[in-house]
């Protein structure tokens, strides 16, 4: 048995779903290295939560769309820190707008963070994991990447792209026993969905068979399963956590 720390990297672990994932993976015995982009106080809260539960964690300010910074992070902070067993590409943003009014900068920023940033982390993690001949990569996509959504063409394209990336990477990395899966959450109670108007929230609820939004902890449970030994024969899949919204 190795005494190395079992490391899980979680991007965007300061708030919402990423925080729930960081706390859950710490409970599962991982040393959780999570990133955030600007919200220092929220990152400190996640770290305090991990430590209060007796877990190990570290917080890093890292914009995942900065490819050089991502490469530096994996090289300087992760490669020799222990055994990188899991990467959860969770960091994501929205900049909604209708097609005819979508600004180039909003298209680019969402694609840069949600898709290119995830690829940058996947590529760096894959370098380490393929050498170790094991590892689990989870990409947090979205139900809208499966079913589309008006007013979110940039975000939907990025989230659908993550599903394609998951399937391509699963095929390419399987020979090194690295599995790659996506989770597609439906509507989850976080600051991202706090921004919905009451009317929109009611309209969405009408279409969700379980008649409620999900919790960040319910997404974290799916991550915990996919990184567990029990999920060793699952790769290239999309696990929907959406209350039946899209099946
Ligand atoms: P959230 O509450 O808005 O949190 C976003 C997280 O991402 C924060 O930790 C934020 O850091 C980080 N982040 C933002 N831009 C970043 C960047 N450029 N580089 C690194 N980190 C960055 O979001 P959430 O609702 O928890 O969503 C988490 C993931 O689930 C996203 O990928 C989202 O698309 C996906 N998702 C969410 C829902 C939902 O209903 N909430 C549904 C389906 C999918 P700071 O705290 O520093 O800003």
Image (spheres, grey):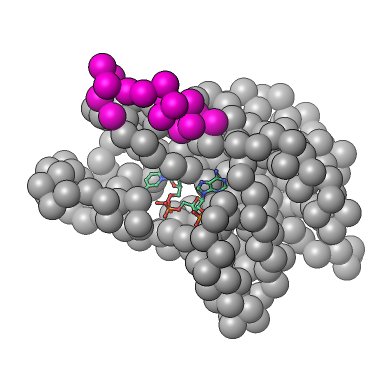
Q: Quadrant of residue 52?
A: bottom right
Q: Residue at x 67, y 58 (%)?
A: 60
Residue at image location 26% in from the left, 51% down from the top: 195
Q: Is residue 8 above or below residue 66?
A: below
Residue 205 visible in the picture: no
Question: Where in the figure is residue 179, as x and y percent of width and height?
Answer: 66, 38
Residue 145 lies in the magenta stretch: no
**Numbered range of the magenta stretch:** 97-112
Residue at 35% across, 56% down: 191
Number of marks in picture: 0
**Residue 244 relative to residue 113: left or right:** left
Q: Residue furthest top?
A: 100
Task: Pick the quarter of the image with the N terminus.
Answer: bottom right
Residue nearer the viewer, 157 or 246: 157
Magenta stretch: helix, strand or loop mostly: helix
- Which quarter of the rendered picture does the C terminus lie within? top left
**Apparent side of residue 202 relative to residue 93 in the rendered image (left or right):** left
Q: Is residue 97 visible?
A: yes
* Residue 99 sits in quarter: top left
Residue 180 screen position, x and y as percent: 62, 37
Q: Is residue 9 above or below residue 120?
A: below
112 on left or right of 244: right
The question of residue 102 being in magenta is answered with yes
Residue 67 point in image, percent of width and height: 69, 34
Q: Is residue 6 above or below residue 143?
A: below
Residue 54: image location, x then y, percent: 65, 81
Q: Residue at x 57, y 52 (%)?
A: 37
Side of 190 where 213 appears, left or right:
left
């Amino acid at each position: 048995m190795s005494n190395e720390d079992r490391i899980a990297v979680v991007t965007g672990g300061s708030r919402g779903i990423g925080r729930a994932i960081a706390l859950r993976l710490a409970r599962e015995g991982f040393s959780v290295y999570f990133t955030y982009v600007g919200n220092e106080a929220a990152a400190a809260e996640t770290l305090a939560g991990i430590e209060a539960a007796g877990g190990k964690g570290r917080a890093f300010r890292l914009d995942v769309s900065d490819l050089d910074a991502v490469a530096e992070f994996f090289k300087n902070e992760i490669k020799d820190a222990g055994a990188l067993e899991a990467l959860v590409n969770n960091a994501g943003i929205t900049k909604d707008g209708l097609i005819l009014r979508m600004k180039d900068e909003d298209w680019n920023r969402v694609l840069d963070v949600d898709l290119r940033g995830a690829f940058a982390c996947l590529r760096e993690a894959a370098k380490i994991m393929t050498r170790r001949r094991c590892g689990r990569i989870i990409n947090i996509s979205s139900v809208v990447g499966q079913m589309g959504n008006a007013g979110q063409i940039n975000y939907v394209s990025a989230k659908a792209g993550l599903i394609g990336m998951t399937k391509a990477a699963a095929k390419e990395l399987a020979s090194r026993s690295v599995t790659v899966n996506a989770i597609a959450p439906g509507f989850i109670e976080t600051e991202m969905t706090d921004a919905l108007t009451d009317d929109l929230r009611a309209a969405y609820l009408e279409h969700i068979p379980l008649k409620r939004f999900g919790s960040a902890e319910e997404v974290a449970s799916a991550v915990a399963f996919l990184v567990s030994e029990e999920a060793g024969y699952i790769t290239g899949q999309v696990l929907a956590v959406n209350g039946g919204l899209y099946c």
